[in-house]
Amino acid sequence: MERIISHSPVLIVVIPLVSAFLTLVIGLWKKRLCYPFVIIALSLSLFSCIVTLNTVMKSGTIHYYLGNWDPPWGIEYVVDHLNALVLVFVSFISLMVAIYSKESIEQEIPEKVTFFYTVFLLQVTGLLGIVVTGDMFNLYVFLEIASLAGYALIAIGEDGAPFASFRYVVMGTIGACFYLLGVGYLYIMTGSLNMADLTHLLPNLYHSKVIMVAFVFFIVGVAIKMALFPLHAWLPDAYTHAPSAVSALLAPLMTKVGVYVLIRILFTVFRPEFPIKILHATDIMAWFGTFAILFGGIMALSQTDFKRMLCYIIVAEIGYMVGGIGMANATAIKGAIFHIINDMFMAACLFLIAGIVMHETGGHDISDFTGMFRRMPFTAAIFTIGALAVIGVPPTCGFFSKWYLLLGGIQARHWGFVMALLLCTLINVALFFRVIDKGLYVHALEHKLEHASEPKELQFHEAPLSMLIPGFIIAIAIFLIGIFNQAILKNIIEFAVPSGL
Amino acid sequence: MLDFIISKYNYWIYIILMMMGFYGMIAKKNLIKKVIGMNIFQTAIILYFISTAAKKGATIPIVEHGHGEAVHAIHAIEYVNPLPHVLMLTAIVVMVSTLGVALAILIMIYRRYNTLEEDEILQVKGK
């Protein structure tokens, strides 16, 4: 047992990777067994994530040398407080989405179940790998594993999906290539690919132009992957047309993992003084964050499609986090890190609802929500919790991260960002009350009922349990994270904030 | 100026290739041409990495008589840097799989719209 625990950082990645290929074999033999196998694999992965977090909290940062090659020659996995936390929640959300995916996949793409689960596990492998690794080139490989799996998963969606996915391929490849180029520049200057090694080697070179260009390539590359405005163009189409289980997996995780990579590069590979004092990159990022918030909020208002509206909300949420990083003080970065986790849960919750509505009514327009509170009371309850969290109503988790972001913004005296945050909160209220209004609006239906022979639209018609339970768990988690926010902040995030701010 | 260009000619070549690919990805309307542009773009980066490994008068990085007899010192200057080559093996794998996924998606698009011209597809989608 001791031996297994000491290998937990690598098991996080190895378990989903190996089971991805086993799923394919099992699926070809007996299709039914795919689903339970995926659940077992993801549960084991979640378990090793929790073990890792526990070890990190007890004894500090874990260094795991793959194949026992010492860094900087071998690949090293480094787990500190920041990525241990992100790891646990990435694997938790993927497990929830996997449980949820059964019914919606059987309805939307019945003939591709085996391949879906294989690629699903590869996607999770990529996401967890990005977070766990401590090597720049290894991160590129995992980034591409996650992206390639994402392209494939999106392309199996509804009518416009292949074209949206192709756009994502082109944009995503540019992003990944820019990142790779940044790695190349760092390598010719320092001769190292290991993040911890680079932290020591780089300070002497901070005034070199090559390092500056490498830094810019990293930021632009990662910004494409996480859909920072104005590089977000691929996101709304791709996540709207993807199958509902896929958008529930990708939308919360892929963009947020991008934000994690950004924090890693800004504050671990480079030391905080480089982006903040030497390049003043954080000032620019603060404004990009502000514009992303405003643009995302305003575009979300003009959508009639619920999933598309959520996509623009995600663009705005990315703006919160990038803006928070751009504030460059400990409070705002605490808020940004906390918001990574909160936004994973909020986005997962709302995209699960979009999937449930799609499963029950066959569409994901806002008009499909008509009478939802009567027809699907449980779904409506989960939806309301998710909506309140995005708006930021106190006991839910969304409030607390927004609070820290606001405090950080005020501390940095960046009034543009503060105003954008407040304005976007108001826009979110309008957005969700529009949907809730539709959901409660039953008079028109009752009127129609008097004339219709079959009162189909008002019948109690709840989604299957396997879809509702993950939604409930995530909704409860939103509350729990909100209530125990101090515990999470004090015990984990406090240590994750980079020193020297 | 000319000296500056000639002394760093490998970087100029990779930048020109990369911009060609970038142009293809952004400006071409045909989706296959976009994929070709994407490939040129990725190849340019691979060439860049490989060119950084080269050294004048160096040989392939295999240590002769490594076992037992290797008592003499090994001078890194005599061998080209193997690491960028190894990295690029992985990058080539990534590149090939990106190409594979892109082509598979193009087949799906062609089945649905019967064309690979971007403006025609947008017209069909707009209706």
Image: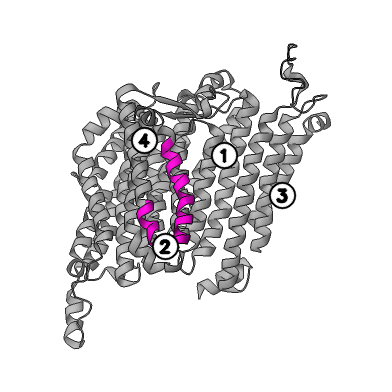
User: If you read the primary sequence from the N terminus, does the residue marked by circle 4 or circle 2 appear first?
Assistant: 2
In-image side of A363 versus A167 (left or right) = left
**Amino acid type, label 2:** Lys
Kindly identify the amino acid type of the residue bearing the numbered disc 3. Met
Give the labeled residue for mark 3.
B20
CB under 8 Å between callouts 4 and 2? Answer: no
Residues under labels 4 and 3: Cα distance?
A: 40 Å
Helix, strand or loop for disc 4: loop
Q: What x and y, as percent, mark residue A364? A: 35, 67
Q: Which residue is mark 2?
A: A31
Q: Amino acid at mark 4?
A: His
Marked residue chain, label 4? A
Magenta span: A11-38
In the picture, measured across the screen, residue A179 lies left or right of residue B16, that is left
Q: In x, y percent, where is residue A185?
A: 63, 31
Dot label at residue A179 = 1
C-alpha gap between disc 3 and disc 1 = 19 Å
